[in-house]
Image (tube, rainbow, N blue to C red):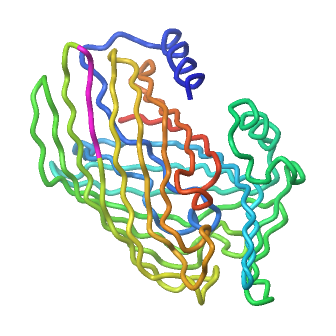
Amino acid sequence: MIRLLIALLLLACLTGTAVAADMEITPFRTANQSPLVQIFGLPAESDATITPSGHFTINVTQDVASDYTVSTTSREQIILDGESYRWTLAARYGIGSRFEAGIELPYVLYGGGFLDSFIVDWHKFFNLPQGGRNYASKDKLNFAYYKDGVQKLRVNRADSGIGDISLNAGMKLYEAGDGEYHDSLVLRTGLKLPSGDSASLQGSGSTDFNLSLCGSMNNFTEWGALGVFGSLGGMVMSDGDVLRDQQNNLAGFGTAGLGWGPTPWISFKFQVNWNTPLYRDSSLAELSRTSVMLVSGGALLLPADYRLDIGVTEDVAVATAPDVAFHLGLSKRF
């Protein structure tokens, strides 16, 4: 983590530009990247600001996640070994003074990847538990789940394709501020459509609807920008194609975070994401335990008001999310 923050600072020194106002602290635009979770409609967007009327906000994000977990009980076995790459193009358009509408187009790729050796060495250097990754075959793809002697899931061939497309909207509930502070509260909703191939885990086969309340408070002081943010929501899902008889139809989710921007062109922030289980009738953490993740990193304000988020995600609740995921997000308002 120290190396990431140093890299952010060095990059900022090379690319930063002087601006009149501090950069607001905003959430990372990412969610749980587990191959059995990202197929559903957990929203990545939890920003508490609405795009101004007649303008577009464009986000391009990339999430690279490395999974390795093997769990076995007397009735079940799950193997999640591989890497996922998710690219998302999202656009939001401001309508009037309080509303916005948007769309998200994801592209998902699964493969053996290349991060296994790096992660093994990283864990060894910091004396972290390997979880068996150091004994497993490197850079292989194998997602499998067995219950009562029946194979219920198997993905072992690299593949890619369009994921499940989402339509979303936001409504401003409250906003106040001046040059010293900015507080806001937004109601967000999203509808995920079953456009991706569920057999390849590019989609779930379900139609999902989510509703969330997102808030933030930013203060601009002589020490820079100080911000806190959070969200709380719920999601309802129709029956999908992946582990259909064990899928939950309701789930809760949320975020909480804080950050500090010492200059107008760089900020450092930490964010916790959580979601309740999306599956039932299992004693495995990968399926039936609440997921908690920590996202650490920061944001850079680049020339022409482009904003770059850089984050690293770790599974605080072990095995409920990928061991590690790397997030890049580029945004711009037009």
Position of 97 compared to 294: left or right?
Answer: left
In the rendered image, residue 228 lying in the magenta stretch gets the answer yes
- Residue 162 magenta: no
- Quadrant in the picture for residue 221: top left
Residue at 14%, 54% in the rendered image: 173
Q: Residue at x 60, y 22 (%)?
A: 3
Quarter occupied by the N terminus: top right
- The quarter of the picture where the C terminus appears is top left
Expressed as whole percent of the image width and height from the top left, the position of residue 17 reads: 40, 11
Q: Height in image: 224 above or below 191? A: above
Residue drawn at x 49%, y 36% is 296
Main SS, magenta region, reads strand
**Vertical relation: 56 (above or below) 285:** above
Q: Relative to 130, does residue 241 appear above or below in the rendering?
A: below
- Asked whether 122 or 243 is in front, the reply is 122
Q: Position of residue 262 (x, y in %)?
A: 33, 17
Q: Which residues are magenta?
A: 223-229
Who's the residue at 63% across and 45% down the image?
324
Q: How many marks?
A: 0
Q: In the image, is 74 to the left or to the right of 25? A: right
Taking 314 as reference, is 254 left or right? Answer: left
Quick one: 333 or 209, which is closer to the camera? 209
Nearer to us in this view, 293 or 243: 293
- Up the image or down, 255 lies above or below 16; here it is below
- Image x and y of residue 282, in percent: 60, 81
Give x and y (percent) for residue 51: 27, 44
